[in-house]
């Protein structure tokens, strides 16, 4: 219910009391939220509508664990989508994230099997993910090749490396992994979250702070708005552009680690097509794919929307999984149209 | 420019230089090297001789024929993709359209009273191709009509299309047992495999249409600068709508072949990742991703290269999935060679004054990707 209040609030202006009823009425009707918030607000409205729909139709939908399970099942998607938001804000795209996740899971499983300590494995996989991202970012920036094609090569490279390590699933048996996957933070008798949700929350919080309050964050928006202008303003375009792909690579590797907490195994078939989910979440969250406009909060709402749709389809039972893809496609279409209208009106 | 004497004197080296500078020189060299490697490997491992072609039961067989046959699906998709990329667009939805088209044809045939009736199969083919072209036109409408970026517009169908294919097949793998339909993927006509002929026909049609009429020039004009071409009196929107529809149609034919050779429709796996292979083939063939220039013959070379790479990897006994590693290296190398910024940095002496290079040279990243 608090969510509903938060989104309705902008429609009723608070401030000095208007002189008469007609004036108040005109102000209420005439109020428009700032245009940059419209896509995020639209996502929030969709999310709330979906939740109300779920509550109204399914008896057990109201249990707190239903919502908590959405957080648990999508914890790694939050992290990937957060990294993807940085890249898309600069006007780029990162197709390699799904493959980097697979590479991370298989590499972790192999190294653990070989008897490496957990902290060393974690450091190695995170370093590899970040390096891959930085490498792709450097090629994109310094050689001026389209992000789409470079990260496509990254997709092939990471998936190919994964297959050359192992073509089969490897189980992970390690006390640290067992702890991370089974430990729960409890809020009551029937409500709990995993530690991965906490990691995701921390990553998102850091991401929001970086985007809003640091030079890196502001430069990210500036590059997406107009790279040429950003360069002429003397902003560190090269460093930032390489950095966002590094951030995305790091987030993907971290998401891979969280994936192994969620499903303790390394499998080259893990996370096939996850980049599409991440991109869809970012777009549904109201971030402009041409860059320069959007919020990480929107991405969070986008991931929640995807998760909620999945949950509703599960509750419905007779609607099979392919409906998910169709519904997500329709939502993408609706939000891309909305963005188009917002951009058209701004010009 | 030069006197006739000096031209004659430098003629052999000049000709060699012209040859090595030809857009398709390196792709063809790599293709030949791949074929020779495959031949040596199959010799060492005592397989069937690589360059042998035999005639059995009215059809050609042999490793080379297999490359053509298995490459035909990719060939069809890549032809449509070439024209889309030439208008500075991209079509990510082809894999999904392959799945939808195959699913539609198989559903239609499985509902027939007699699966072997030629008329029924023909109707199924027309319906499936019509649906595929319609999906392509939808992409074209989003790009040309509403003005959405091509990557994003076709992303919608990439996400939703596979769901649509599974909706058509009700989530199951529909198997068909239809003689006429199986001939599309497995039959022979004039001793040539039918899929190869289909791919060749569509490619030749596209080549004729773009090189013997003004259409090719218009497509390149739209890719070079859509606004300028519109002012020059070219219907840029109509051209875009046309190429996306054609791309959908090509993917539809590819889907028919795919479903026919597997004797069934698999909404999940049909044409999975084929959009990536197709883009790769187009880029290898020298078509610029920025649009405004395209080469269908280059795409043919690109497709053959990717397919012989896949075949030789199978022959070497390496896990076939590692072919992705090679593809990654190839696409990186080709893109780097095509990139003006990269060439400017490699030939440091001949830097253009207009474009000051960024401060840090980047050999480290190259090494990283190669590693």
Image (spheres, coloured by chain):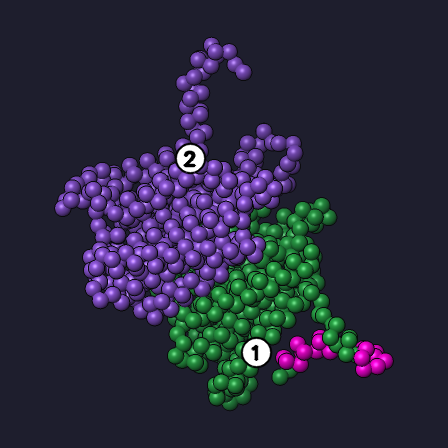
Chain colours: A green, B purple
Residue A154 visible (yes or no): no
Magenta highlight on residue A4 = yes
Compared with residue B181, is residue A180 higher up or lower down, i.e. above or below? Answer: below
Question: Which residue is at the front of the view, A226 or B144?
Answer: B144
Q: Residue at 47%, 78% (x, y): give it.
A: A312
Q: Within 10 Å of the Cα at label 2, are there few (<14), some (14-19), or many (20+) other Cα atoms?
A: few
Q: Residue at x 75, y 72 (%)?
A: A30
Q: Quadrant of residue B260?
A: bottom left
B278 sits left or right of B314 in the view? right
State which region is magenta: A3-23
Task: Kindly give the residue lying farthest to the front in the view shown.
Answer: B119
Q: Residue furthest right?
A: A19
Please check the rendered image and state whether residue B224 is part of the magenta-colored stretch, yes or no. Answer: no
Furthest-top residue in this view: B5
The chain under label 2 reads B
Mark 2 on the same chain as mark 1: no
Q: Which residue is drawn at 46% across and 48% down?
A: B243
In the rendering, at what x and y percent does residue B202 appear? 35, 44
Foreground residue, A125 or B90? Answer: B90
């Amino acid at each position: 219910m608090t969510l509903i209040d938060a989104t309705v609030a902008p429609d009723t202006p608070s401030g000095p009391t208007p002189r008469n009823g007609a004036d108040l009425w005109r102000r209420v009707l005439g109020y428009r939220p700032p245009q940059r918030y419209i896509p995020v607000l639209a996502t929030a409205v969709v999310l709330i509508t979906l939740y109300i729909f779920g509550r109204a139709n399914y008896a057990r939908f109201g249990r707190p664990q239903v919502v908590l399970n959405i957080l648990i099942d999508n914890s790694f998607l939050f992290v990937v989508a957060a990294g993807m938001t940085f890249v898309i804000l600069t006007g780029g795209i990162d197709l390699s994230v799904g493959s980097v996740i697979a590479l991370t899971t298989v590499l972790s499983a192999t190294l653990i099997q070989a008897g490496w300590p957990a902290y060393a494995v974690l450091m190695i996989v995170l370093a590899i993910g970040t390096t891959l991202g930085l490498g792709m970012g450097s090629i994109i920036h310094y050689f001026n090749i389209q992000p789409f094609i470079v990260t496509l090569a990254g997709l092939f490279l990471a998936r190919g490396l994964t297959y050359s390590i192992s073509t089969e699933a490897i189980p992970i048996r390690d006390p640290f992994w067992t702890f991370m996957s089974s430990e729960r933070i409890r809020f009551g008798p029937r409500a709990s979250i995993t530690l991965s949700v906490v990691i995701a929350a921390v990553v998102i919080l850091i991401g929001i702070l970086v985007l809003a309050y640091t030079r890196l964050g502001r430069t990210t928006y500036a590059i997406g708005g107009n790279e040429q202008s950003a360069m002429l303003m003397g902003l560190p375009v090269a460093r930032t552009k390489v950095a966002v792909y590094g951030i995305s690579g790091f987030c993907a590797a971290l998401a891979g680690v969280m994936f192994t907490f969620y499903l303790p195994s390394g499998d080259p078939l893990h996370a096939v097509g996850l980049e599409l989910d991440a991109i869809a979440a970012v777009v549904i969250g109201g971030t402009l794919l041409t860059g320069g406009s959007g919020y990480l909060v929107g991405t969070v709402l986008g991931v929640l929307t995807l998760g909620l749709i999945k949950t509703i389809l599960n509750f419905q039972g007779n609607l099979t999984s392919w409906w998910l893809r169709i519904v997500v496609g329709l939502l993408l279409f609706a939000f891309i149209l909305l963005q188009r209208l917002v951009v058209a009106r701004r010009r | 420019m030069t006197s006739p004497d000096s031209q004659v004197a430098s003629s052999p080296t000049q000709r060699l230089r012209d040859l090595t500078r030809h857009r398709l020189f390196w792709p063809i060299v790599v293709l030949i090297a791949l074929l020779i490697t495959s031949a040596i490997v199959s010799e060492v491992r005592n397989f069937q001789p690589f360059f042998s072609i035999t005639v059995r039961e009215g059809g050609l067989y042999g490793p080379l024929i297999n490359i053509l046959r298995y490459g035909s699906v990719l060939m069809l998709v890549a032809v449509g993709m070439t024209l889309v990329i030439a208008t500075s667009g991209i079509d990510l939805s082809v894999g999904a359209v392959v799945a939808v088209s195959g699913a539609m044809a198989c559903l239609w045939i499985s509902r027939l009273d007699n699966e072997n009736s030629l008329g029924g199969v023909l109707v199924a083919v027309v319906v499936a191709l019509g649906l595929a072209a319609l999906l392509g036109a939808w992409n074209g409408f989003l790009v040309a009509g509403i003005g959405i970026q091509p990557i994003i517009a076709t992303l919608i169908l990439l996400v939703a299309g596979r769901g649509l294919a599974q909706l058509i097949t009700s989530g199951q793998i529909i198997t068909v047992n239809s003689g006429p339909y199986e001939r599309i993927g497995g039959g022979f006509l004039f001793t040539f495999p039918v899929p190869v002929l289909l791919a060749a026909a569509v490619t030749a049609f596209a080549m004729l249409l773009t090189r013997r009429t003004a259409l090719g020039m218009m497509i390149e004009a739209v890719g070079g600068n859509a606004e300028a071409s519109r002012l020059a009196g070219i219907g840029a929107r109509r051209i875009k709508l046309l190429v996306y529809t054609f791309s959908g149609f090509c993917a539809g034919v590819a889907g028919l072949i795919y479903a026919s050779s597997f004797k069934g429709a698999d909404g999940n796996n049909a044409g999975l990742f084929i959009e990536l292979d197709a883009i790769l083939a187009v880029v290898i063939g020298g078509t610029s991703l920025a649009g405004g220039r395209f080469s269908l013959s280059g795409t043919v070379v690109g497709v053959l290269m990717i397919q012989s790479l896949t075949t030789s990897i199978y022959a070497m006994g390496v896990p076939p999935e590692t072919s992705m590693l090679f593809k990654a290296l190839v696409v990186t190398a080709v893109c780097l060679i095509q990139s003006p910024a990269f060439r400017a940095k490699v030939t440091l002496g001949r830097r253009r004054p207009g474009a000051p290079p960024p401060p840090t040279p980047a050999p480290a990243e190259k090494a990283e990707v190669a590693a």
